Amino acid sequence: MHKNTLLLLFLLVLNVVSSQIKLTQNVGDELINPSVGSCSEPEHWARAFTLEEYGISATDEFQINSGSIGVRASVGQQNAYLQFNIYSIDSGFPGTFSESNLIGSSQKEFFPFVSILSPQIVTVDFDTPVTVPANVERILIEVEKTDGTGFGVMNILIAGTEEGGNAAWYKGCLGYYTYTSTDIAPLPRPNANLYITANGIISNNTFQYNNVCFGDNTEFSLNFDEEIDTVLWDFGDSTTSNVLNPTHVYAAVGVYDVSVTIQTINNPVPKVINKQLEILERPNANKVPDLISCVDTFGSGFSSSFDTSNLESLISNSQENIVLTYFDGNGNELPSPLPNPFSNSIPNKETITVRVANQNALNCYSETSFDLIVNPIPDLSVISDLFMCSNDTNGFAIFDLEQVQNEILGSSMATSVSFYRANENQIQGPLNAIENLIINEEEITVRAFESVNNCYNETKFKLKVNSLPIAYNVNVLIGCDDNGDGISEYFDTSTVESQIVSEQTGLLVSYFDTSGNALPSPLPNPYTNSIANEETITVRVTNTQTYCYEETPLVLRTSSQPQLNIPSPIYACDTGNGFASFDLSHIESEIINGQIGINLSYFDANGVQLPNPLTNSYENSISWNETITVRAENSLNPLCFTETSFELVVMELPITQLEPSYFLCHLEPSLTIQVENVFESYNWLYEGDDIISDTNEAELINAGSYTLTIGKTTNGVYCENSYDFKFIRSSPPTITQVNYQELSNNNYIEIIATGDGDFEYSLDGINFNESNYFTNVDGGVYTVQVRDKNGCGEDSEIVTIIDYPKFFTPNNDSVNDYWQIYGIDQYPNSYTYIYDRYGKLVAQLAPNAKGWNGLFNGRPMIPSDYWFKTFLENGSVFSGHFSLKR
């Protein structure tokens, strides 16, 4: 936004909140050198102001009480006068400017001659304020330079500010006798921001009038903020009144100049307030006929089809300068003109009031009214969809529309009825035999007319063809005849209804015998036929909503039932985990015993059907004992069957107890072993070939692999079982070498032994291991051992591991109180020297000594690292260091 605009907004706010309002377009009061030339003739400078921008509304009177102008004297010896003139202007200024629109002027203010003067602001306080009347939106503040005689006045240059908003205006000498903007060449200076301002206040001293319609009492009221002494009204028609707030009836239409002269108690100078008043002709409100329309929805009382297209012309009857206002039945104002089509807001009948007012005085009006009348339509609420069952399950059926027609004519005000399809073609021909043209469902439009008000109503209904339910075919029911009379008490009817209905829902199933008599529904289960050998029952499936139904036959047929033998259990030897191979090739003949016309089926314990005929090497599917089910069906009727079963039993193999291995020391001649003497056969084999015994015992001489096979007959089946074992001879072990490592972070001992046996090893003679290698061995003396696990001898050696502790804590807690070389006692002629960190000898240890207790000359040594050097009797020397901790 331009900073001039911001400044003007600021000034506007400032002026509104103060008692004085300043009209200005200049930024500040700091003047610059004059920029517009001058001459010695009368001149006029001006600024235009829109009052609303300064917070002066159209209803306010604005009293201007002073004006200011920026000037500088120029050459010349004459004196001059300055006068402020206030004009009313419009948006066409300056082209529409007229001196006849002068509102008022200040007195002439004398301006004495002063030689070359710096720019200054001259302010003229008006002796009599100029009142800008209400409803004046824009004014021109003109400053006129004159001597009172119109000639020979002094040159005066008008000054301005750095910025000045809108254009300034000039007329006078220099050839400009109508107002010209200072921005337009050839004036001396474009953008001349002439400093012209005015100050004033908003005045409420005025009068108002009401009722300017011809024939009415026009009311006048005075609004004055001083105490009134006398008042004289001049109504402009040669009549007067001295009543404070008078009323007056004018004798003719026309424009009248009304004035009121007021003299207050405190001010003897009369004040005159002038206003023009126009007495207006009252417009005519012509009567129009009522509007009639048919109701939109039966019984609602409302219609949205009122035709208002001719209302305006009928009511106004060519009158001009009028305003039409409409009011509904509740007194609410409606849009003008009324929408077309129009809807009533009060059911059945509503009175609309029309006010015809003079557009210049809306309280000068006449009124008329008309009614919105809603006529009823035939009642079609009785109409509903028609339903029929499909003729041939094809989605088409014959409907009776004549019945619908008669129902409408008999129950409403309708005088005629017609039917139409979706393509708007009227249905012709006999209405009692109309077939739908769209499969399953067709929408029909029905129109009912009444001849009194020429109204009609229409609605839609559907011709719905209900599909027939499906009565699915049901399997023939077979009942087994167990005595040959053609009657069976075993017909299973449990699935009849589900077969016939399938996935359909909402259906009723009913049954009828061959004579059409109703049977119980559902049928009893089991059911007994009443006609021997074969009987047919009719099953009807009915849709409970549409009552459409379809039928299907149910056949009951009897057949003979097979007679079966029950087979004996079949046994076989266990081949592992309770499973065996059975020979079942003979089972069929055993079951049917010569009968013909029988089909057998076999099923294992899991219900899995087995091959037929059964094989001679069948393996059971359940361990140890399995039941095989046999189904024997009549070949003429599979549903007439008999079932039986037989058992497959797996025989456990004979059991005895043998060790997996037998041991004998190398020097003993033989070992005799035996088992229970309860089996039919024994067979001892050496290395799989040589038979060494056929009794329940055997003598083992040679080391190696042996097998014992035993046999026994149970339930007529002979079963054998075999056991494998080993015979092992052991020789005592001999230690041939002991490897070891000492004085390291991972001391170890490895025992090397020879011999034929299963050995184990130990460092203490108590704890034995499979491994001959021992790690993380502490220093000391060890008796290493190796022995045969089966007790066939042992061997040992003594091993000394030299090592030393890495720290000791001589605090008399019986734990690590002494430091000594581990295993040094095996070297009686050796000795050890101990030194502190400075190489000072602090102790000498003998092999059989308990060790160093951390004292030197009876005093405890400080916690630190100490060094040692050991000399063994075999000439070996080793050294190291350790820590003393306290």
Image (cartoon, rainbow, N blue to C red):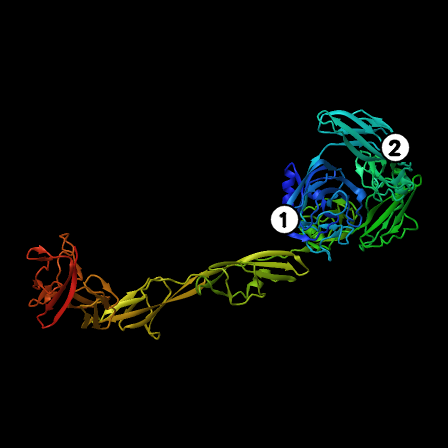
User: How packed is label 2: few (under 14 Cα within 10 Å), some, or many (20 or more)?
Assistant: some
User: Which secondary structure, mark 2?
Assistant: loop
Going by the image, does 83 lie left or right of 788?
Answer: right
Considering only order in the chain, which callout, 1 or 2, is on the residue closer to the N terminus? 1
Estimate the x, y position of residue 570 in percent, counting from the top left: 50, 61
Of residue 410 and residue 87, the one placed in the foreground of this image is 87
In percent of width and height, residue 871 lies at 9, 69
Q: Which residue is mark 1?
A: 117
Q: Is residue 671 left or right of residue 383?
A: left
What is the count of numbered marks? 2
Q: Nearer the viewer, mark 2 or mark 1?
A: 1
- Identify the image quadrant of the C terminus: bottom left
Comparing 182 with 859, the one in front is 182
Residue type highlighted by circle 1: Leu
Q: Secondary structure at mark 1?
A: loop
Residue 425, visible in the rendered structure: yes
Vertically, is 344 above or below 442? above
Residue 350 in sight in this render: no
Label 1 Cα crowd, 10 Å radius (few <14 / some 14-19 / many 20+): few
- Coordinates of residue 469 in the picture (x, y in percent): 76, 51
Q: Residue 214 bears which disc, if any?
A: 2
Instruction: Using the rendered view, name the quadrant where residue 831 is placed.
Output: bottom left
Give the residue displayed 82% in from the left and 44% down from the top.
Answer: 384
Kindly indicate the quadrant of the structure image that contains residue 56. top right
Toward the viewer: 396 or 574? Answer: 396
